[in-house]
Amino acid sequence: MYRKAIEELKLWKEKSERKPIIIRGARQTGKTWLMKEFGSTCYEKYVYINFDNNPRMEALFQSDFDTERILLGLHAETGQSIIPGETLILFDEIQEVPHALASLKYFHENAPQHHIVAAGSLLGVALHPGTSFPVGKVEFLDLFPLSFPEFLLASGNEPLHDMLEKLDFSMVRVFSTKFTELLRQYFFVGGLPEVVKIFLHTHDLKEVQSSQKQLLSAYEQDFSKHAPSRIVPRIRSVWKSLPTQLARENRKFVFGLVKTGARAREYELAIQWLLDCGLVNRVDRVTKPGIPISAYRDSSAFKLYGLDVGLLCAMSGLDPISILQGNQLFEEFKGALTEQFVLQQIVANTGINPFYWSAEQSRGEVDFVMQAGGMVLPLEVKAAENLQAKSLKSYYQRYQPVKAFRTSLSGYREEEWLVNIPLYAIHSFAEIAKQFLYR
């Protein structure tokens, strides 16, 4: 599978002032594969160390941070010589050995000629009290599930991928039925590499759902393994409440749906833990779309979305037959799957973490608002064929953004105040919006 993130690693390799880089992301997003693919295609060779359940490597990093001694130990462990610039050093599950994480500072300062890529699921990265994190001495690359364009490439639909990348909407319109069919598949399968691989090899949706449920079970086992025992039950309760929370009309997170009588302060740590692990995405409310938008955050009102649209389908027990029933899948949970998809594409392709806006004294609400180019851009998500956008029109009249944006299954079109972007092209939201910022 092609991952766009490999291009960022190639740019990292060519930097003159290179620091060790840490690939972050939830478990099963493909960090190990990406590291090894980068090592095998862009270097003469690579050495790979997995710190999970590896007492010998834990002992190697325990005594001191002498980089020459550590390199000698890596040579002994792997049986391979390490040549600066030619051999890529790969550290996997680095959070399992905190001293290995701390050693990256000393590699940067004392042995910058060596190229080091580390990977760690966010599980446990920040959960070692007293660990010296190499602040300012490392770079980061966040890895997410496959985006829809990456799914198109993986499934052999390169021409369709290229149409989207070129924003050739006249051609996209011709093949809209095909795009919609593939989008239905993506909604159900999601973007976790192992699940995508099973789907492409078997095209068996029950096998897909079985794989997703195994992953969900593994995530829950990680709660017990890595989280403080006192908050594990609360983490599980928040995690299992996601489908119920998102099935609500306005999606706003309600603690009473986690447990009757629950209060925010009782679940703050549990939510933060899930955020740190990359298993949920939090979208806070803003009271006003001002600049900087973060200054208008109302952190008492927020929505929690999952990691992956396919996993959300599995958590909800959605029947595989739904993928065959026209466009009903896009409207499940009152359109929550579609919002999950849109958020997932925006975060993965732009790095922007959106907010949402709602009016104080009315039901008006805009699904996502984002700051870009010194402006705040509103984006309304429509899963149904009914494309009325009363809240978005009200927002536009009140705040006068350069344009308002809507994403739906309809084709691309520009109106006087509104731009409609097809759902299957929403990963290019930032690129499309940029055209209007500087007119």
Image (spheres, rainbow, N blue to C red):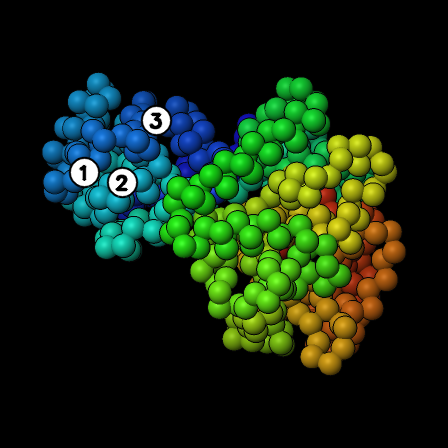
Label 2: how many residues lie within 10 Å, few (<14), some (14-19) or many (20+)?
Answer: many
**Residue 298 % position (x, y):** 57, 73
Image location (x, y in percent) of residue 153: 63, 30
Q: Which residue is mark 1?
A: 61
Name the residue rendered at 83%, 43% in the picture: 328
First of labels 1, 2 by sequence position: 1
Looking at the rendered image, the quarter that the C terminus falls into is: bottom right
Residue lying at 60% horizontally and 34% vertically, measured from the top left:
213
Q: Is residue 312 above or below residue 212?
A: below
Is 81 on the left-hand or right-hand side of 248?
A: left
Marked residue nearer the N-terminal end (3 or 2) = 3
- Which label is found at residue 97? 2
**In the displayed structure, does residue 130 sit left or right of residue 160?**
left
Residue 328 vs residue 119, the one in the foreground: 328
Identify the image quadrant of residue 115: top left
Q: Secondary structure at mark 1?
A: helix
Mark 2 secondary-structure assignment: loop
Give the CA separation, mark 3 to mark 2.
26 Å
Q: Residues within 10 Å of mark 3 (few under 14, many from 20)?
A: some
Measured as percent of width and height from the top left, residue 75 is found at: 19, 24
Tell which of 133 and 159 is nearer to you: 133
* Residue type at the position of mark 2: Val
Confirm whether residue 38 shows in the render.
Answer: no
- Quarter of the image for residue 99 reads top left
Total count of labels: 3
SS at badge 3: loop
Q: For residue 43, which numbered disc appears in the image? A: 3
Q: At 67% from the left edge and 19% from the top edge, which residue is drawn?
A: 202
Residue pushed farthest front? 260
Q: Nearer the viewer, residue 4 or 70?
A: 70
Q: Amino acid at mark 1?
A: Phe
Q: What's the mark number on residue 304?
A: none
